[in-house]
Amino acid sequence: SIINVTGGTFRGGMDAWVLNNIEGEKAELNIKGGNFNANPTSYVADGYLAVENNGVWNVELAAAKIGTTAYATFADALAAVKGDETLTLLADLNLKEILTINKAITFDGNGKTLTSSAGRAINVSGAEANGVKIQNLTINASGERAINIIQNATNVTVDNVTATAANYTVNVAASAPAAVVAIKNSTLNGLCT
């Protein structure tokens, strides 16, 4: 059996939960929302966080995750991600500054939208970013570029991305002369250079 909790106020502590059905089979508690007077972290669903404030825990959707570790903010997840890991968006993202990817990660938009008012939405930058994958993402960039490959970055894959920008949706700068960009299953509304 699975018990899904999506909201409400719960008092009495987590020990008050009875999670066994009469057949003796263990039931699963899957919390995706609510307000608790005891820490519900052990029961929080993947992609959600229990945030404590003055002895009360609120369960809420995280901004992003790396593996099964959820992060309250995208900035925290970006700082924590290591090369060869996947950073997955769990909510739409609005940015006023350039998102710089300088490690060989997979940035999985998970069907979400990145809206950027910066001059460039995403910079893939540096030799350490060789092998970056940007996938499953919609990019709405009001600035001149959606994805900008710079500073010796190479081997970038753009897969299942819909991008719109004022000028270039994918741009390889002169500072990345050896860049190879694979674009798959994507809709790019703007120039590509």
Image (cartoon, rainbow, N blue to C red):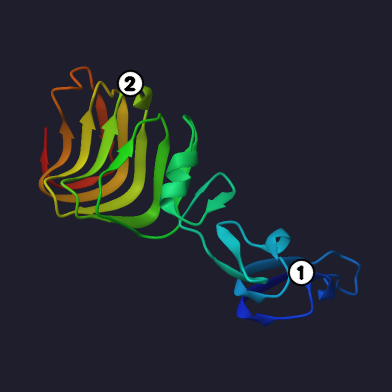
In the rendered view, does 152 fall on the left or right side of 14? left
Label 2 CA crowd tier, 10 Å (few <14, some 14–19, many 20+)? some
In the rendered view, does 65 fall on the left or right side of 119? right
- As drawn, the label of residue 1 is 1
Instruction: Examine the image and state in which quarter residue 148 appears.
Output: top left
Q: Residue at x 83, y 75 (%)?
A: 16
Task: From this view, report whether residue 169 is shown above or below residue 15.
Answer: above
Q: Residue at x 70, y 66 (%)?
A: 40
Q: Say which of 23 and 135 sits in front.
A: 135
Percent across and percent down for residue 13 are: 78, 74
Check the picture and name the quadrant holding the C terminus: top left
Q: Nearer the viewer, mark 2 or mark 1?
A: 2
- As drawn, the label of residue 177 is none
Mark 2 or 1 closer to N-term? Answer: 1
Query: Which amino acid type corresponds to the residue marked 2 in the rendered image?
Result: Ala
Where disc 1 sits, the SS reads loop
Q: Say which of 179 and 55 sits in front.
A: 55
Percent across and percent down for residue 109 are: 38, 50
Query: Which amino acid type corresponds to the residue marked 1 in the rendered image?
Result: Ser
Q: Say which of 42 and 108 sits in front.
A: 42
Check the picture and name the quadrant holding the N terminus: bottom right
Instruction: Examine the image and state in which quarter residue 4 appears.
Output: bottom right
Where disc 2 sits, the SS reads helix
What residue did someone put label 2 on? 127
User: What separation in Å lies between label 2 and label 1 (alpha carbons)?
Assistant: 49 Å
Q: Residue at x 45, y 55 (%)?
A: 73
Q: Residue furthest top?
A: 178
Q: Residue at x 68, y 71 (%)?
A: 55
In the rendered view, does 11 fall on the left or right side of 124? right
